Image: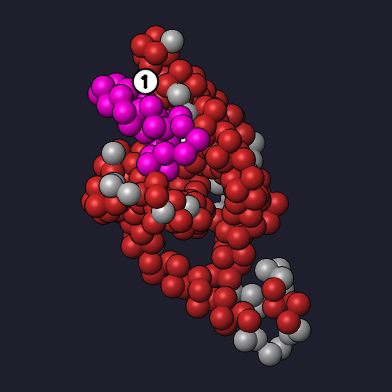
Amino acid sequence: MGLLQGVTELFPVSSLGHAVLFPDLFGWTELARAQAEPESYFLAFLVALHVGTAIGLIAYYWSTWFELIQGLFQQLTRRDVSFVARLNPTTPGTSHHYRLLFLLVAGTIPVGIIGVAFEHRIRTIFSVPRYAALFLTINGLVMLAGEILRRRASRREEHHELSDLSVTSATIIGSSQIAALFAGISRSGIAMVAALLRGMSHRDAAQFSFLLATPVILAAGVYKLPDFFGPLGDGIRAQAIVAAVVSGIAAYFSVKFLARWFTTHTLWPFGIYCIVAGVYFLIRFG
């Protein structure tokens, strides 16, 4: 499960969808049953997996995050403009790193609010194989549709660089991650599609989606830490820690592979996989 989480969280094929489908596929009936319960040890287990994945992402992008935090301090300590102007990413003289950090915050707020309000309810209702298979199929169709629309648009419009991204575009891309609350919809996949439709290249869309995912995944894990250290974590903490380590290592090498992949490749293979796998699971569990 740790390996599955670390790979599928970054590959645009939905980690939550696979976490729902694979226990049933392998006959892990107790784990499968625990997923759909309002309160179970599976919640504590997911906490560890999310924290492990986030640490793997931070390890890969540690220099980028260091530059972003450094840019924040440099911006806040500027003396040539007022404090309010320092917070504005469009203020003349604002560094690229502060602007990117501002865009990441703008993109994270919507999914954070909706996640806190509705994640638990959505998970308990839709974390069953037939729904996960349906949303996995939809995830594949969305990625293929996004590629087709992006190809048509690219003939008429110029590509936008990450440095040219507007606050509105960042918010729209970040808000698209709300769909990933449904098991089967990929966080990175839906964010990349939104970024592509805003005129970004595959490389920049992938980088921005991975940077966006880091605080969301980490926050989701930290927010639920009381579940891990509370009664729900009794008896599974050691297993969860091992799974978290595996998840972190898998996430690191997954993002390393994908960062190179999207310099020359597209979402097509992942979209086709999701459709094929989704239809298979629909037939199996339908």
From this view, report whether residue 89 is shown above or below residue 256.
below
Residue 31 forms part of the magenta stretch: yes
List x then y, in percent, for residue 38: 50, 35
In the rendered view, would you say 247 is above or below 95? above
Residue 58 lies in what quarter of the image? bottom left
Q: Is 200 or 101 nearer to us in this picture?
A: 101
Name the residue rendered at 39%, 56% in the picture: 229
Q: Residue furthest front?
A: 231
Q: Secondary structure at mark 1?
A: helix
Position of the C terminus, as image quadrant, is: top left
The prevailing secondary structure element of the residues shown in magenta is helix
Task: Tell me: 284 left or right of 174.
Answer: left
Rendered-image quadrant of the N terminus: top left
Report the span colored magenta.
Answer: 15-43
Query: Is residue 281 one of those drawn in magenta?
Result: no
Question: Could you say where residue 159 lies in the image, as x and y percent from the top left?
Answer: 57, 46
